[in-house]
Amino acid sequence: MNRARAARELVRELRQRRFDRSPGTTARELLDRTAFARAVALGPNGAQRLPRLRELCHVFEKIAADERHDYDAASARVREWIDKPVQLDPPHPVGAEAVQVMTVHQAKGLEFPVVAIWDGKGQWDARLQASPWRMERDGHGWMINLAVLTWEEPAGLGIRDAEQRYLDSERRRVAYVAATRARDLLIVPKAGSVSPGRFICGNLLADVPEQLMRTTELYIDGAEPAWSRQMKVIDRNAPGDGSD
């Protein structure tokens, strides 16, 4: 009973002081000083859940700073996530040896010392998703495409061809963004024969000045080249008890 009373008094104290400091500081103290962190750490998947809660404290503080909210306003803002959950991007790793795996759209606006293109067989022709119904992008027409019926209204708009051209242009834009994220080194995989004009990597490798490109030894399972054995051993410390 005394412990529960002490916890309530602590929460009351922290709430009274919430306007005297940043909202993130109050959130972190509520997490740590009320034994909530200990309860989470000792519960199911505690080693994974506790770091996520600490990340949420940072997100909470960022929202308060960006939108100029006090603790109460930021809390009301975040409380909306209960009914409408949001997708939060994972925090950027702080280690110098970190390898980030992300989509090209996530990498837009960023740069990295080394960028490796993943898909060595990606093709330029974007596949138009089969859909029985499609609207023109400006809303001035529509098209229906069924097994035995194809109709466009008004006739002659060429919605299907226009949509295909749009997707092809978008794919070229995405490929450009991917290749220009590299600051020092761009790694382009060559999986078999990748002719330019059909394969994205084929175009990236075509007509590159010899002094700017280096081709590494082929990777073969069971007969790995020397470059694949240059990885340093990474020491991974097991996470300790979250209650500590």
Image (spheres, grey):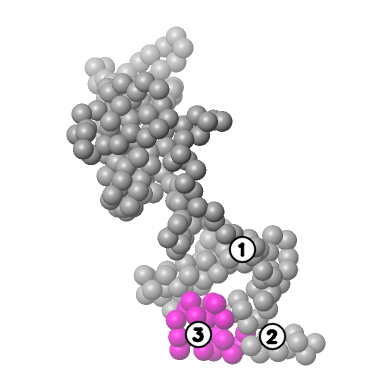
Q: Find out whether the residues at labels 3 and 1 contact each other: C-beta distance under 8 Å.
A: no
Q: Say which mark, if any, is on residue 237.
A: 1
Q: Is residue 229 above or below residue 19?
A: above
In front of the other: 237 or 172: 237
Point out the tag, 3 or 2, that comes first from the N-terminus.
2
The reply to whether the C-beta atoms of the residues labelled 3 and 2 are less than 8 Å apart is: no
Q: Secondary structure at mark 3?
A: loop
At label 2, the amino acid type is Ala
Q: Residue at 65% x, 73% y: name it.
A: 37
Segment tinted magenta in the rendering: 11-29
Depth check: 43 or 200 in front? 200
Q: Position of residue 72 (x, y in %)?
A: 49, 77
Q: Residue at x 36, y 70 (%)?
A: 66
* Residue 151 falls in image quadrant: top left
Q: Residues within 10 Å of mark 2 (few under 14, many from 20)?
A: some
The quarter of the image holding the N terminus is bottom right
Give the amino acid at mark 1. Answer: Asn
Q: CA distance from mark 3 to mark 2?
A: 16 Å
* Whether residue 2 is situated above or below residue 24 in the rendered picture: below
Q: Residue furthest front?
A: 226
**Sequence-wise first label, 1 or 2:** 2
Q: Position of residue 81 (x, y in %)?
A: 53, 61
**Badge 1 vs badge 2, beta-carbon distance below 8 Å:** no
Tag of residue 18 = 3
Distance from Cα at disc 1 to Cα at disc 2: 33 Å
